[in-house]
Image: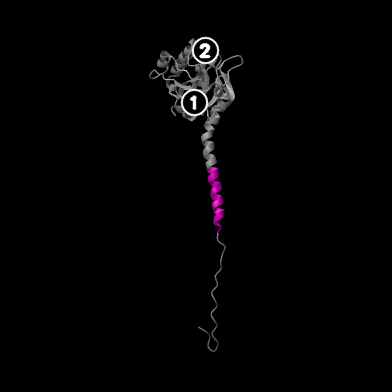
Amino acid sequence: MSAPGSAASPPEPLSFAVHSLPDPRVHARGAQRAGRWKMLLVVATCAAPVIASYFTFYVVKPSGSAYGELIAPAVDMPADLPLTDLQGQPVSPAALRGQWLLAVVHGSDCPAACERQLFVQRQVREMLGKERPRVDKLWLIPDAGTPRPEVLAAVTQKGAEVTVLRVPADRLAAWLKPADGRKLADHFFVIDPMNRWMERTPAEPEPKKLLADLNKLLKASASWDTAGR
């Protein structure tokens, strides 16, 4: 109320202070950066065991040097390598991922040396014991012929099956290489679960020494590799 005799003071107009609002784009950029860091952390966490196992096998080599020749850097199986089964159906190279592969290269005629290699391939895998489900046997045939019935019976025997695939000789030779003065058929080739050729055995390898190399590889990769594709 106004004092007596004094004129009433006019009411003061209301005023509003408008403060700047946060820019939503700044928040979005911050969230995006945080998301990227989280993604990188997940990738690093997943990759660490793989890197550690390769470092252990290639660099530290806790059990001594490898019997076979390590291929460094490992050579990727070409994603467009034209593989077909014995019925002529195409097989994607990606279908071979997820398992260690103990591979041999022989023509469809499969002479005595081929039969010996297939026998050693089978015996070495069996000697892996509880680790054998992590290793598949692979026979690459660089021609269009059909193996003899007795050979087919051996490689399709239940519980001892071999993955048999045809591949053009020139495309195979662009990926796998023999030692100087040798042929592809002289060696076993070890391919890792990521489809990378990473070891070549000596010609006519000693089965126990080949087995020792495989055991080292399986032990080194135990933290990230499991059986089955």
Magenta region: 22-38
Name the amino acid type tagged 1.
Leu
Indicate which disc residue 224 carries.
none
Where residue 224 appears, x then y in whole percent? 49, 30
When the figure is inspected, residue 114 is found, relative to residue 2, above or below; the finding is above
Q: Earlier in the sequence, mark 1 or mark 2?
A: 1
Q: Position of residue 190 (x, y in %)?
A: 52, 21
Residue topped by disc 2: 206
Where is mark 1, residue-wise?
A: 83
57 or 157, nearer to the observer: 157
Res. 52 in view? yes
**What type of secondary structure mainly makes up the magenta span?**
helix
| Label 1 crowd bin: few (<14), some (14–19), many (20+), radius 10 Å | many
On whether residue 110 falls in the magenta region, the answer is: no
**Whole-percent x and y of residue 9?**
55, 83
Alpha carbon distance from label 1 to label 2: 29 Å
Kindly report which numbered mark, 1 or 2, lies closer to the viewer in this rendering. Answer: 1
Q: Quadrant of residue 44?
A: top right
In terms of secondary structure, where does tag 1 sit?
A: strand
Q: Amino acid at mark 2?
A: Glu
